[in-house]
Amino acid sequence: MADAKLYWKSTCTSCRNARKLLQDKGLPFEELNYARAGLEPAEVKDIVKAAGSVEAVLNTRHEIAKANNWKDRPPSVTAFATAVAEEPNLLRRPILIRGKQVLVGFDKATEALWAKLG
Protein backbone atom coordinates (compact mmCIF):
# COMPACT_ATOMS: atom_id res chain seq x y z
CA MET A 1 0.00 0.00 0.00
CA ALA A 2 1.26 3.45 -0.91
CA ASP A 3 2.19 5.71 1.97
CA ALA A 4 2.82 8.66 -0.32
CA LYS A 5 0.85 10.78 -2.77
CA LEU A 6 2.42 12.38 -5.81
CA TYR A 7 0.51 15.30 -7.27
CA TRP A 8 1.83 15.72 -10.77
CA LYS A 9 1.09 16.71 -14.34
CA SER A 10 2.08 14.33 -17.14
CA THR A 11 3.15 17.15 -19.48
CA CYS A 12 5.58 18.57 -16.90
CA THR A 13 9.20 17.42 -17.32
CA SER A 14 10.03 17.99 -13.65
CA CYS A 15 7.00 15.95 -12.65
CA ARG A 16 7.99 13.08 -14.93
CA ASN A 17 11.55 13.17 -13.55
CA ALA A 18 10.30 13.08 -9.96
CA ARG A 19 7.91 10.24 -10.78
CA LYS A 20 10.70 8.25 -12.43
CA LEU A 21 12.98 8.76 -9.43
CA LEU A 22 10.29 7.39 -7.11
CA GLN A 23 9.68 4.43 -9.42
CA ASP A 24 13.42 3.72 -9.72
CA LYS A 25 13.71 3.72 -5.93
CA GLY A 26 10.79 1.29 -5.71
CA LEU A 27 8.87 3.58 -3.38
CA PRO A 28 5.13 2.94 -3.43
CA PHE A 29 3.06 6.03 -4.13
CA GLU A 30 -0.39 7.01 -5.27
CA GLU A 31 -0.35 9.11 -8.42
CA LEU A 32 -2.73 12.02 -8.77
CA ASN A 33 -2.45 13.60 -12.19
CA TYR A 34 -4.41 16.66 -11.19
CA ALA A 35 -4.22 18.25 -14.63
CA ARG A 36 -6.40 15.42 -15.93
CA ALA A 37 -8.60 14.66 -12.95
CA GLY A 38 -8.68 18.09 -11.32
CA LEU A 39 -8.77 18.72 -7.60
CA GLU A 40 -11.62 19.58 -5.29
CA PRO A 41 -11.14 22.61 -3.03
CA ALA A 42 -11.08 20.36 0.06
CA GLU A 43 -8.14 18.39 -1.33
CA VAL A 44 -6.27 21.62 -2.17
CA LYS A 45 -6.83 22.74 1.42
CA ASP A 46 -5.33 19.43 2.62
CA ILE A 47 -2.29 20.00 0.41
CA VAL A 48 -1.84 23.53 1.75
CA LYS A 49 -2.18 22.28 5.32
CA ALA A 50 0.44 19.58 4.75
CA ALA A 51 2.82 22.03 3.07
CA GLY A 52 2.32 24.65 5.77
CA SER A 53 1.13 27.58 3.67
CA VAL A 54 -0.33 28.75 0.39
CA GLU A 55 3.07 30.26 -0.44
CA ALA A 56 4.68 26.82 -0.33
CA VAL A 57 2.51 25.46 -3.14
CA LEU A 58 1.62 28.59 -5.13
CA ASN A 59 2.86 28.78 -8.72
CA THR A 60 3.83 32.46 -8.71
CA ARG A 61 4.69 32.34 -12.42
CA HIS A 62 1.05 31.76 -13.40
CA GLU A 63 -0.71 34.75 -14.97
CA ILE A 64 -3.53 34.72 -12.40
CA ALA A 65 -0.99 34.82 -9.57
CA LYS A 66 0.87 37.66 -11.26
CA ALA A 67 -2.29 39.64 -12.02
CA ASN A 68 -3.38 39.38 -8.38
CA ASN A 69 0.11 40.05 -6.96
CA TRP A 70 -0.11 36.78 -5.03
CA LYS A 71 3.67 36.52 -4.80
CA ASP A 72 3.67 39.46 -2.39
CA ARG A 73 0.16 39.00 -0.98
CA PRO A 74 -0.93 35.34 -1.20
CA PRO A 75 -4.64 34.61 -1.14
CA SER A 76 -6.41 32.93 1.74
CA VAL A 77 -6.45 29.16 1.79
CA THR A 78 -10.12 29.14 0.76
CA ALA A 79 -9.61 31.57 -2.13
CA PHE A 80 -6.57 29.61 -3.31
CA ALA A 81 -8.38 26.27 -3.08
CA THR A 82 -11.27 27.63 -5.12
CA ALA A 83 -8.90 29.11 -7.71
CA VAL A 84 -6.90 25.85 -8.06
CA ALA A 85 -10.11 23.86 -8.50
CA GLU A 86 -10.81 26.09 -11.52
CA GLU A 87 -7.20 26.46 -12.72
CA PRO A 88 -4.95 23.57 -11.60
CA ASN A 89 -1.80 25.23 -12.97
CA LEU A 90 -1.86 27.63 -10.01
CA LEU A 91 -0.49 24.71 -7.99
CA ARG A 92 3.28 24.35 -8.02
CA ARG A 93 4.42 20.91 -9.12
CA PRO A 94 5.25 18.20 -8.44
CA ILE A 95 4.16 17.76 -4.84
CA LEU A 96 4.95 14.66 -2.82
CA ILE A 97 3.22 14.13 0.51
CA ARG A 98 4.61 11.25 2.50
CA GLY A 99 3.49 11.23 6.09
CA LYS A 100 4.61 14.56 7.53
CA GLN A 101 7.20 15.05 4.79
CA VAL A 102 6.22 17.34 1.91
CA LEU A 103 8.40 18.02 -1.11
CA VAL A 104 7.35 20.75 -3.53
CA GLY A 105 9.03 21.22 -6.88
CA PHE A 106 11.74 19.17 -8.50
CA ASP A 107 14.67 21.36 -9.41
CA LYS A 108 18.33 21.79 -8.48
CA ALA A 109 17.33 23.10 -5.05
CA THR A 110 15.09 20.14 -4.16
CA GLU A 111 16.46 17.24 -6.20
CA ALA A 112 18.82 16.15 -3.42
CA LEU A 113 15.88 15.91 -0.99
CA TRP A 114 13.99 13.69 -3.44
CA ALA A 115 17.10 11.55 -3.92
CA LYS A 116 17.32 10.92 -0.15
CA LEU A 117 13.87 9.35 -0.03
CA GLY A 118 14.01 5.79 1.02
Image: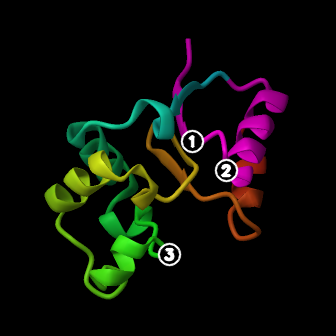
Q: Which mark is residue 8?
A: 1
| Residue found 56% across the figure and 11% down from its top | 1
Screen quadrant of the C terminus:
top right
Residue 22, quarter of picture:
top right
- Answer left or right for 118 relative to 47: right
Q: Secondary structure at mark 2?
A: loop
Amino acid type at circle 3 is Arg
**Residue stretch rendered in magenta on the structure:** 1-27
Q: Nearer the viewer, mark 3 or mark 1?
A: 3
| Residue found 56% across the figure and 27% down from its top | 31
Determine which residue is flagged by label 3.
61
Q: Residues within 10 Å of mark 1 (few under 14, many from 20)?
A: many
Determine which residue is flagged by label 2.
12
Q: Look at the image and tell me whether residue 98 can be seen.
A: no
x and y, in percent, of residue 86 in the image: 28, 49
Q: Secondary structure at mark 1?
A: strand
Mark positioned earlier in the residue sequence (3 or 2): 2
Q: CA distance from mark 3 to mark 1?
A: 17 Å
Residue 79, quarter of picture:
bottom left
Amino acid type at circle 2 is Cys
